[in-house]
Structure formats: structure tokens, C-alpha cells
Image: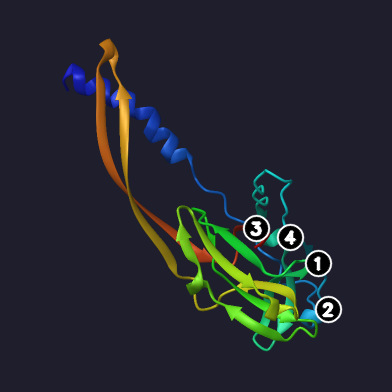
Amino acid sequence: MSTAMHRIAVALLPLLLVACASVPKAPNRVNLQGQCAPSLAALQPTPLTASIAPEGKKVKAAPLTDFAALGQCVENEKGRVATIMWKLQDVPLPSMVRLEIIANDAATLAAGMALLDEQHRVVRRHGFHEFARRGRSFTLDMFLNPSDDGVRYLVLTPDPDWVGKQDETISGITNTVYLAYGAVYNYGTEGKSVRQLSDAGQLRIQILPL
């Protein structure tokens, strides 16, 4: 091996070690084996209010949360389902509900959203196929118009049509290695990311008045 090639190999070794060590952590899942609510009406909803920024400032992004942190077990006609239910509080109309799911290398939550009225009847549904990819996340924008004044709850559950499938992305990466005597070595790689669409993952939700 030439001296130049030896230097390149030595310089690349730490990068390879970091890549090997970066094993994504498996996300937590909602426990479906323990106590389970018999219906949506029996669930304890999480309050959700609109995000309003001080005058002249931008609205801060909502914090990320694990699906398992807010998820509960509920029984329906298909069995036990992991579910988050939010209750809308003092939400002005019109508003936009933005739901963002993080495309995690360990598992990406494939979810659907339902809007319910006071009696927990479905007003409308949005499946995972309606989410738009934006960088390393999937987002769904839902508009609450004055005609939606009967919507009281938002319910998030894994979308059975998508859980178990894969999300694939291909991206180009340019890497720079600085060698001895000021020499620079640039090389390009093409990376393919394969993420498992799952019933677990990270998300954020925010209501933005229009």
C-alpha cells in the first residue's frame, strides 16, 4: 500500500467506527397486554390548545414526544389498539392542525388520524398515505374550518395498511478528509436508508390559528 493510500485509510477508520457504533435505539411501544379501555369514551384524553406566539414573534415548534408516552390501549371491533386521544380546548376557528412524525432509523410510526365529535363519532379520517414527506419527517396538515365547530377530539392510531411496510430513501453524501501537509481528499457516497414503518415512534402535534 502506498503512503498516500495508507494515510487515507487511517483517516477514514474513525468514520467507519462511528458508523458501526451508531445503532439506533428501538422505540418504546404501548403496552397492549395489560389494562385496556373498553371504548374511546373511557380513555383519558390529553388536552390540546392552540399555539399563539407573542406579538411580533414566531410560534415555537411543539416538543417531540414518544407515541408510547401518551398512547393508551383501547378495545375496538378489530381488537386492542394503541391510541392517543387529544381533546381540543379553546381552539379558534379556522385553525390548522399540524402533525409531524419523525422518520427514525429504528422505526417510523405509520399512523392515521381521526377527528371525532362530542359523542366520539368520526367526523373524518386521514390515513398515513395522506402524509407528505418533508426531509426526515412525515407531516399532515388538517384544517379546522368554522364548519368543523363540532370536532372535539383528535385520535391517533397506527395505520394497519402501512405498519410493517418499509420506507426507503436514497441520498448523496460528500465527505472531506484532511490529510497531512494540507492535502484534502474528497469522496462521494450514495446512501440508501431503509426504515421500518411501525406502531411506535416520535411525533409532535401543534394547532396554529389561521
Q: Are marks 2 and 1 in contact (CB under 8 Å)?
A: no
Residue placed under numbered mark 3 in the picture:
28
Disc nearer the start of the sequence (4/3): 3
Give amino acid for label 3.
Asn
Regarding mark 1 in the picture, which secondary structure is present there? loop
Q: Residue at x 35, y 29 (%)?
A: 13
Between the residue at mark 4 and the residue at mark 1, the CA separation in whole angstroms equals 8 Å
In this rendering, the label closer to the viewer, 3 or 2: 2
Q: Earlier in the sequence, mark 4 or mark 1?
A: 4
Q: CA distance from mark 3 to mark 1?
A: 28 Å
Residue tagged 4: 50
- Compared to residue 146, the image places residue 193 above or below, namely above
Q: Quadrant of the N terminus?
A: top left
Residue reaching furthest to the top? 181
Outermost residue on the bottom side: it is: 77
In the displayed structure, would residue 176 be above or below residue 140? Answer: above
Task: State the separation of the CA atoms marked 2 and 1.
Answer: 19 Å
Query: How many numbered discs, if any?
Result: 4
- Of residue 64 and residue 177, the one placed in the foreground of this image is 64
Separation (CA) of disc 3 from disc 2: 23 Å
Label 2 sits on residue: 42
Query: If you read the primary sequence from the N terminus, does the residue marked by circle 3 or circle 2 appear first?
Result: 3
Please name the residue that numbered disc 1 is placed on: 89
